[in-house]
Image (cartoon, rainbow, N blue to C red):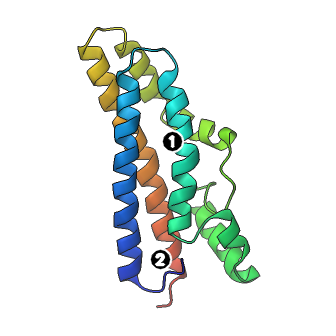
Amino acid sequence: MHITTIAELDRVRDDARKLVTKRALVSAGASAVPVPGADLIVDANILTKLLPDISNRFGLSEKQVQALEPDRAKQVLLIAANLGNGVIGRSITRRVVTMLIRRVGARYASKSLLRLVPFAGQIAAAGISFGAMKLVGNSHIDDCYETVRRTLPA
C-alpha cells in the first residue's frame, strides 16, 4: 500500500492496533495454559507473523522497501535505524523475534514465576503476556507510523 496522506496513515495505524490487540489476546490465552515454554513458542510464532503484517500494512515490508526508488529506500531505512527499529524493511526471522522477546525479558521471567502460583498466577501471567505483546506490537506500529510520516510530502 502506498500511503499519501496523514488520514490514510492514521487509518492504517488504527487497524494495526486492533490487530495487535487480537494477537495479544491469543498470547494471553497461551500464557494461561500451565505448560512450561508453550507461551514463548506461541509468542514467537505470533510475532513472526504479526511484525511483517504490520510492516506490510504501512508499505514497509522488505519487498516493498526494495521496490522503492533507491534514494527513497535509503531514506526509509535510515529513518527506521534512527528510531532504533531494525525490523522495518527487513526480513523477520526467528533470531529477530528472539531479540525482541529479550527486550521484554523481565516480563517473561516474572510471568514464568507467577505461573507456579495456582489460578491467580495464571491470570497474572496472562495479563503480563498481553501487556508484553501489546508493547512489542504497538512499538513497531509507532516506528512504522513515524517512518512513513517523515517521508510524506509536507
Side of 14 relative to 141 (left or right): left
- Check the image and report above or below for 96 versus 111: below
Closer to viewer: mark 2 or mark 1: 1
Residue drawn at (73%, 72%), measured in percent from left and top? 66
- Asked which secondary structure carries label 1, the reply is helix
Front-lying residue, 2 or 139:
2
Q: Is residue 131 visible?
A: no
Q: Please state which amino acid type lies under the numbered disc 1.
A: Ile
Q: Position of residue 84 (x, y in %)?
A: 58, 55
Q: Position of residue 30 (x, y in %)?
A: 41, 28
Q: Any mark on residue 114, and which?
A: none
What whole-number distance in Å separates the C-alpha atoms at marks 2 and 1? 26 Å
Q: Please state which amino acid type lies under the numbered disc 2.
A: Arg
- Check the image and report above or below for 92 versus 57: above
Q: Position of residue 142 (x, y in %)?
A: 43, 61
Residue drawn at (66%, 67%), measured in percent from left and top? 77
Report which residue position mark 1 lands on: 46
Q: Is residue 95 visible?
A: yes
Q: Any mark on residue 149, and which?
A: 2
Residue drawn at (45%, 59%), measured in percent from left and top? 141
Front-lying residue, 27 or 138:
27
Q: Image quarter for residue 5?
A: bottom left
Residue drawn at (54%, 52%), measured in percent from left and top? 51
- Check the image and report above or below for 17 versus 133: below
Side of 115 relative to 89 (left or right): left
Side of 59 relative to 13 (left or right): right
- Check the image and report above or below for 14 versus 4: above
